[in-house]
Image (tube, rainbow, N blue to C red):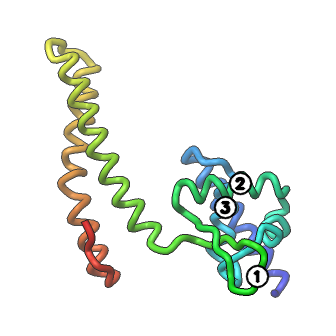
């Protein structure tokens, strides 16, 4: 692999790490995810990841487990190989949007419960809960149509 291209990919992985860290994920998890999105081949061993990201095996192991748990990557084996490989999980973004829809419903239900608890109050908490509920009602109405349009555009079967 061209050295400059390798450095650019490592820099990209670092940028993804910083971006995801700002969203509450560990930076190293973002770096692993970023690397896997640009790595050749797209499946990488633990050794590949530790070398490319200049990180310890323990750190990479912890972060790959986290990324597997949240459904962004998967561990695979290849015929005739004794080692495991990691790669981006297929259909990740569709699944994440479906999970967002489920979370949207849960947040709307929580806001409604909160509103019931402060139904006689006219304060900032009630206004905040009402805004939260209204926003999640809007998302519940819009996300299914967005998902359906995405599945149609990407050629994926609509499954709900």
**Mark 2: few/some/many CA within 10 Å (<14, 14-19, 20+):** many
Q: Residue at x 29, y 79 (%)?
A: 157
Query: Observer-nearest residue: 12 or 156?
Result: 156
Q: Nearer the viewer, mark 2 or mark 1?
A: 1
Precedes in sequence: disc 3 or disc 1: 3
Element assignment for label 2: helix
Precedes in sequence: disc 3 or disc 2: 3
Residue 118 screen position, x and y as percent: 21, 16
Reply above or below: 57 against 152.
above
The disc placed on residue 15 is 3
Give residue 113's quadrant in the image: top left
Precedes in sequence: disc 2 or disc 1: 2
Element assignment for label 3: helix
Query: Observer-nearest residue: 144 or 10?
Result: 144
Residue that mark 2 sits on: 28
Residue 108 screen position, x and y as percent: 25, 39
Residue 147 screen position, x and y as percent: 28, 67
Residue that mark 1 sits on: 81
């Amino acid at each position: 692999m061209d050295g400059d291209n390798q450095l650019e990919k490592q820099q990209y992985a670092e940028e993804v790490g910083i971006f995801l860290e700002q969203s509450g994920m560990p930076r190293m998890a973002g770096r692993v995810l970023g690397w896997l999105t640009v790595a050749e081949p797209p499946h990488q061993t633990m050794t590949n990841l530790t070398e490319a990201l200049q990180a310890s095996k323990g750190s990479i192991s912890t972060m790959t487990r986290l990324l597997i748990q949240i459904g962004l990557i998967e561990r695979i084996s290849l015929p005739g190989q004794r080692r495991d490989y990691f790669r981006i999980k297929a259909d990740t973004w569709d699944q994440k949007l479906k999970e967002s829809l489920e979370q949207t419903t849960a947040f709307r239900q929580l806001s409604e419960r909160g509103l019931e608890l402060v139904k006689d109050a006219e304060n900032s908490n009630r206004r905040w809960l009402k805004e939260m509920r209204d926003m999640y009602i809007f998302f519940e109405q819009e996300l299914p149509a967005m998902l359906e349009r995405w599945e149609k555009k990407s050629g994926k079967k609509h499954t709900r």
